[in-house]
């Protein structure tokens, strides 16, 4: 299995992970001749899909939770928010069940190095982002040996951390291109709107509500809405700020293409101690694959390959299934263990090959 741009789809490939939009099944796993769906996928805002082909046969892409759990949580969150828009009441029973299910699965998979990128269109970004951010936050908390009660507070708060975006004008929220200063100030209000909405749920712990209010704060005081710094930010907020930014960077947006995992991790590490808690950044990056399974990479000898497996504790030196020579010609694939071939390194990932990673402004996170 591997993740490919829809522009790379070929007749011999088949869908490896089902593609959904707004809860509806668009392409089931196993569907063949997928190249004929390129225009439809592009029109829906979906630019990447997981496929199986001869080059990626046998490659597994691990996730911290089951695919069906991730899909179900997105759907429950979407249904809950849509019901809220009609009735002005936010029912959390279904969300609570989702959080507890995710916690159970994460605790059962303590050693997984997460490689998965979730697939979603721009219209579904908030739901997909909320679920993925919750998973990442709980992965950090697992390393801190949080009790189940603390995991629940963190999980439900993170799942609802962007609920305020539902009250922001969609024309501004999903604007293509840079926001004006006035628009950015308006979008920043989502944290306050989210907090005020969650205040109406009396059963929700205050610490969970504060996640919605404070997840854009930074250790150096450069965040919003209050510009808090240092010890004014509790551990929940420090965790969610890291998870939130990582998922924002590694997900396609209407105004910016996603970054590769290695560049997103560099972003966090470069800003640790200043904006992000360095201990928590370290705990997080230990659980991620720098070069995820199924990703296309260029090697220092100019050969191309697909990352096939991770070497535990050595994130920069995974196994690579080499598929092209230095001239760009297809070859009989073979496995290369970069822990043994120390003269060969990864110099670029697919996303680095195909695009540059521009600087990021605060309104993009």
Image (tube, helix red, strand yellow):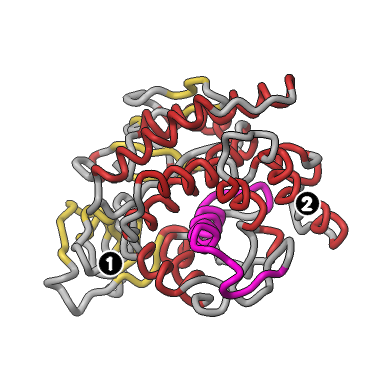
Q: Pinpoint residue 353: horizontal percent, then vertical percent.
A: 46, 63
Q: Pinpoint residue 311: horizontal percent, then vertical percent.
A: 19, 63
Instruction: Tell me the residue at 70%/51% (across/down).
Output: 191
Instruction: Tell me the residue at 28%/55% (across/down).
Output: 113
Q: Kindly give the residue lying farthest to the left in the view shown.
A: 340
- Asked if residue 62 is positioned above or below residue 340 in the image, the reply reads above
Q: Which residues are magenta?
A: 227-255
Please identify the quarter of the rendering in which residue 30 is found: top left
- Of label 1 and label 2, which has the lower sequence position? 2
Magenta residue check for 254: yes
Q: Is residue 55 visible?
A: no
Please identify the quarter of the rendering in which residue 86 is found: top right
Frontmost residue, 160 versus 148: 148
Q: Which element type, helix, strand or loop, lies under badge 2? A: loop
Q: Main secondary structure of the magenta part?
A: helix
Using the numbered discs, state the Cα–Cα distance from disc 1 to disc 2 in whole angstroms. Answer: 38 Å
- Residue under circle 2? 189
In-image side of 300 versus 163 (left or right): left
> Which quadrant is the N terminus positioned in?
top left
> Which quadrant is the C terminus positioned in?
bottom right
Q: Which element type, helix, strand or loop, lies under badge 1? A: loop
- Residue under circle 1? 315
In-image side of 320 versus 272 (left or right): left
Q: Pinpoint residue 314: horizontal percent, then vertical percent.
A: 23, 69
Q: How many marks?
A: 2
Q: Kindly give the residue lying farthest to the front in the view shown.
A: 202
- Asked if residue 257 is positioned above or below residue 74 in the image, the reply reads below
């Amino acid at each position: 299995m591997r993740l490919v741009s829809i522009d790379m789809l070929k007749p011999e490939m088949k869908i490896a992970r089902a593609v959904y939009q707004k809860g509806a099944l668009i392409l089931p796993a196993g569907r063949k001749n997928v190249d004929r769906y390129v225009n439809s996928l592009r029109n829906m805002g979906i630019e990447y899909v997981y496929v199986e082909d001869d080059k990626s046969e046998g490659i597994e892409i691990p996730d911290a939770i089951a695919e069906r759990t991730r899909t179900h949580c997105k759907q429950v969150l979407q249904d809950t928010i849509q019901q809220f828009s009609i009735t002005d009441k936010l029912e959390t029973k279904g969300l609570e069940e989702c959080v507890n299910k995710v916690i159970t699965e994460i605790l059962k998979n303590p050693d997984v190095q997460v490689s998965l990128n979730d697939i979603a269109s721009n219209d579904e970004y908030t739901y997909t982002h909320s679920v993925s951010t919750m998973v990442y936050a709980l992965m950090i908390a697992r390393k801190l040996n949080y009790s189940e009660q603390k995991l629940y507070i963190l999980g439900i708060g993170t799942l609802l951390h962007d609920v305020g975006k539902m009250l922001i004008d969609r024309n501004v929220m999903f604007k293509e291109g840079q926001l004006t200063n006035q628009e950015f100030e308006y979008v920043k209000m989502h944290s306050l709107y989210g907090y005020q909405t969650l205040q109406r749920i009396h059963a929700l712990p205050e610490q969970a509500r504060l996640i919605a209010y404070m997840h854009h704060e930074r250790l150096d005081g450069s965040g919003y809405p209050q510009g808090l710094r240092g010890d004014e930010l509790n551990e929940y907020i420090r965790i969610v700020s890291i998870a939130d930014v990582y998922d924002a960077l590694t997900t396609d947006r209407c105004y910016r293409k996603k970054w590769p995992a290695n560049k997103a991790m560099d972003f966090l590490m470069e800003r640790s101690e200043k904006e992000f808690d360095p201990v928590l950044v370290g705990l997080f990056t230990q659980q991620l694959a720098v070069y995820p399974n199924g990703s296309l990479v260029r090697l220092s000898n100019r050969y191309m390959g697909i990352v096939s497996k991770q070497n535990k504790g050595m994130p920069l030196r995974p196994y690579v299934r080499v598929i092209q020579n230095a001239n760009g010609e297809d070859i009989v694939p073979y496995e290369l263990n970069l822990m043994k071939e120390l003269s060969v390194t990864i110099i670029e990932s697919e996303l680095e090959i195909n695009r540059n990673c521009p600087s990021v402004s605060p309104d993009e996170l």
